[in-house]
Image (cartoon, rainbow, N blue to C red):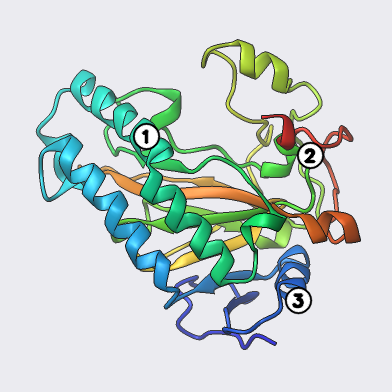
Amino acid sequence: MMALGARSGLGDLANSSRWQPGTPPEALSTALFDGLVVVFEGVGPMRRLVNRGRTILCEIFGTDDPPGAESRLSAKAFRRLALRARTEVAGDRVVRQEWCAVLAAVGYASSETWRDRIRLRVVPSRRDIDHARLSPLAPHRDTWGSRIMAQVNWWLPLYPLQEASTMVLWPQALRKAVANNSRAWDIDEFKRSGGRYPLAPVATSPPDTDGTPVLIEPRVLLAFSGAHLHAGIRDHSGRTRFGIDSRSVWEPDRRAGRRAQNVDGAQIPDMWLRV
């Protein structure tokens, strides 16, 4: 179905593959839930999605180089503009339209797909720009918070990545229990808190191995099971990492029971669909 890609941009991650057009969505989902990390290139709407995201950033930050904007702005000004950009990307009609088109192009039709909101990921290198929504995420599985084992994560960089400023994955931990605080994390408290509650359950001790950094190019999309352990990292370069991410559940997967294995999360179902 899918051949391993030597130039996938995933470093030493062996269990990765390039998507082949025409792959049935059932086969794609099965591979993802089994741990495969899939790279998508040449999907038409993806280029338009990235271009629209970049246009919004350039307009808000008032520069053709939004990643460099943190070097000329105060922490307060950067926070204000970054949070505004997150809101505008999430609510932009063109972004939503092109994102639905991307999912449909790889086989997940809008009429059959539960979609989470679209998020602009903003990770500045400066430590004084402190805000929960603008910080790299600690090691976690998305399924610790969502409790949806048929969840697929999507990750799309808008500008070039650096090895010390990207996302890292621990694929070897997919079926290995990792200590975490998911049983204490409460989605209802999160929704009531107005941003004062932790964004997600996280690992309570650091992984015992180094993660694999993701180094795909802009306009290349990454998909992986929400059960994969992953985290964000940042450097001291003076440049901000911008990307788009989201999550989805294909209804035929849910009905058929296609899903990743829950090895260490709280056993409370269907939390993500309530967000």
Q: Position of residue 156 (x, y in %)?
A: 44, 58
- Lateral position of residue 133 relative to residue 152, left or right: left
Gap in Å between the C-alphas at discs 2 and 3?
Answer: 22 Å
Q: Check disc 3 and give the amino acid type.
A: Ala
- At mark 2, the secondary structure is loop
For disc 2, the neighbor class at 10 Å (few under 14, some 14 to 19, many from 20) is many
Q: Which mark is residue 27?
A: 3
Q: Secondary structure at mark 1?
A: helix
The type of residue carrying mark 1 is Arg
Q: CA distance from mark 1 to mark 3?
A: 33 Å
Q: Residue at x 58, y 57 (%)?
A: 169
- Using the image, tell me which numbered label, if any, was put on residue 86: 1
- First along the sequence among labels 2 and 3: 3
Q: Residue at x 65, y 74 (%)?
A: 15
Q: Amino acid at mark 2?
A: Arg
Residue 112 position within the rendered picture, expressed as x and y whole percent measured from the top left: 71, 57
For discs 2 and 1, the disc positioned in front in the rendered view: 1
Q: Earlier in the sequence, mark 1 or mark 3?
A: 3
In this orientation, does residue 240 appear?
Answer: yes
Quadrant in which the N terminus is drawn: bottom right
Q: Is residue 163 left or right of residue 236?
A: right
User: Which residue occupies the foreground of this view, 245 or 161?
Assistant: 245
**Quarter where residue 273 is shown:** top right
Q: Are marks 1 and 3 in contact (CB under 8 Å)?
A: no
Residue picked out by circle 2? 147
Helix, strand or loop under label 3:
helix
Residue found 65% across the figure and 85% down from its top: 2
